[in-house]
Image (tube, rainbow, N blue to C red):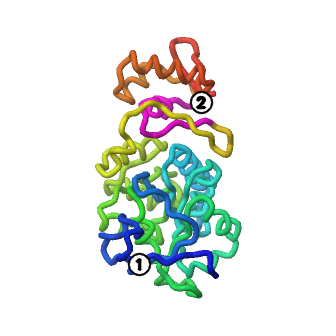
Amino acid sequence: MNNHEFIARSDSQFPSRLQHIPHPPEGIYIRGHMPPEDVPHVAIVGSRDNTIYGRKAANHLARDLASLGVVIVSGMARGLDAHANKGALEAGGQTIAVLPSGIDICYPAENQQLYNQIPSHGALVTELPLGSRPHHGTFHARNRIISGLSDAIIVVEAEERSGTSITVGHALDQGKDVLAVPGDIFSRKSKGTNQLIKDGATPITSYLDAIIALKSQRHLEKFFKLQKPEKQQLSSSVTKMTLASSASLVYSCINHEPMSIEYIIQATGLGISEISRILLELEINGMVKKMSGNRYMRI
């Protein structure tokens, strides 16, 4: 297999996020291209044994974040990891899948289509040499790289004892923010995530919660620096603006239910004149619609 490269830890191209984690890999194999270092990276992980709710949450969070330029990191594993990688691709965004095997082995085999697609929209990554087959130990090692490549970890759905808890442990050791999606209190598949929230993880009910966590991180200041809104085209022909703009903050507060301008002011901290200007631009661009009572909703 010749469509891959090996980047040693001593190489200047080695990801800076992995340089200083406990037990960093001596090098990584890559198929595809690593996204820019100054772009936010968020891991979305969860149980292989999941629910419709979990799959929907993982997919929507990945799509919403990727559509704003955030890189989605996951393990392409059976279950919620794969749904996160898929969500990023559906949004026309970038994603990284960290494998528990050699770069020449698709695991699990059922995700062959994802394995083929990801290198054109990000990268497949592993520290294991060619021909390495996955086993119990490689999954644990893989999880520290998933968290290591990320600025924050979102746990969507997990039981009390699961592989996801290993990723959370690595994230805490690495000083990464841990966010968790609240789940059904009667479902064993949400016991792990609900316990994480009890233990101090940030509850996340929309991608805006992840944005708030990312904005607090100094190395991402340039990405979030306020600037004139820019519009780019996604493969889905949906218009997006850079997450760094104040317009994106306003837009992120608006959904498909009418939202009052007072709520937008409170959520963004921006002044009424700036918000009014932005809302007018969004309305002219066909992105929001003004409703009665000075309320706005997405089109």
Residue 51 figure quarter? bottom right
Q: Is 86 placed above or below 252 here? A: below
Kind of element beneath mark 2: loop
Residue 209 position, x and y percent, is 42, 43
Q: Quadrant of the C terminus?
A: top right
What is the magenta range?
239-255
Mark 1 is surrounded, within 10 Å at the Cα level, by few (under 14), some (14 to 19) or many (20 or more) other residues, namely some
Mark 2 is surrounded, within 10 Å at the Cα level, by few (under 14), some (14 to 19) or many (20 or more) other residues, namely few
Kindly tell me whether residue 166 is visible in this rendering: no
| Residue 227 in the figure: left or right of residue 73 | left
Seen as rendered, the residue at the extreme front is 12
Q: Is 134 placed above or below 65 here? A: below
Q: Is 282 placed above or below 212 here? A: above
Count of numbered marks: 2
Q: Quadrant of the N terminus?
A: bottom right
Kindly identify which residue carries mark 1. 8
Three-letter amino acid code at the position of disc 1: Ala
Q: Nearer the viewer, mark 1 or mark 2?
A: 1
Residue 243 position, x and y percent, is 46, 40
Residue 132 position, x and y percent, is 56, 87
Kindly identify which residue carries mark 2. 256
The residue shown at (52%, 85%) is 129
| Residue 190 in the figure: left or right of residue 287 | left
Residue 124 figure quarter? bottom right
Pick whichever, 81 or 193, lies toward us. 81
Kind of element beneath mark 1: strand
Three-letter amino acid code at the position of disc 2: His
Residue 247 position, x and y percent, is 46, 29
